[in-house]
Amino acid sequence: MTFNIHHGKGMDKQTNLYRIAEVIDRCHADIVGLNEVDNHFSNRSHFEDQAAWLANQLKLEYAFSPSISIESQHVTEVRQYGNALLSRFPITCKRSHSLNTLYGGLEERSLLDATIQVHTRSFQINVTHLSLNPFLHRKQTDFIISHLDKKSEPIILGSVKNSMKTKA
């Protein structure tokens, strides 16, 4: 499952992670790629570590990949925004690849690259949120194809190019 959670905000403009968790729970997905996830980012999400909160609520493992990281003198945690992975299976490895250097930082994006263990088999799970700009989208896609071409395990790529609001 992929899910653009819009930092927890529903169509009613209210931030409510319980509703997001309910949608994920109802889908019974084993692996969930999340986009537009806040990690202590701002007041809009009550400075919550949303991936950790959802993982705890749903009793899943998680990994997070920041697309934006902001250090502040007023807040102890680094404020981040990006992609996340929730999994019923153990996450044995996780890496984050910045896609920002591909185009001079015009639009900050990242690729979450994780390995999960399903019984005795490893799978590569990648989560990203691609640009709507055709030039940037192509650069990001080229990087991802090149990156994934080096992998020997089966690969699942969860990506969002265009976002639509859900009723969560």
Image (cartoon, helix red, strand yellow):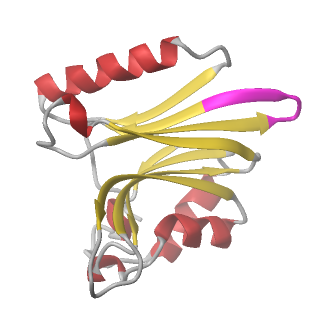
At 38% from the left and 69% from the top, the residue drawn is: 8
At 22% from the left and 29% from the top, the residue drawn is: 102
**In the foreground, 83 or 54:** 83
**Relative side of 77 to 139, left or right:** right
At 22% from the left and 22% from the top, the residue drawn is: 139
**Relative side of 41 to 112, left or right:** left
Q: Quadrant of the N terminus?
A: top right
| Rendering coords of residue 66 (x, y %) | 39, 54
With respect to residue 84, does 121 lie above or below?
above
| Rendering coords of residue 119 (x, y %) | 87, 34
Give the total number of marks visible in the rendering: 0
List the single residue furthest toward the right: 120
With respect to residue 76, does 84 lie above or below?
above
| Rendering coords of residue 49 (x, y %) | 48, 72
Q: Which residues are magenta?
A: 118-124
**Relative side of 102 to 160, left or right:** left
With respect to residue 76, does 25 lie above or below?
above
**Relative side of 26 to 50, left or right:** right
Which quadrant of the view contains residue 92? top right
Magenta-drawn stretch contains 105: no
List the single residue furthest toward the front: 73
Looking at the magenta stretch, what is its main secondary structure? strand
At 35% from the left and 42% from the top, the residue drawn is: 110
Q: Quadrant of the C terminus?
A: bottom left
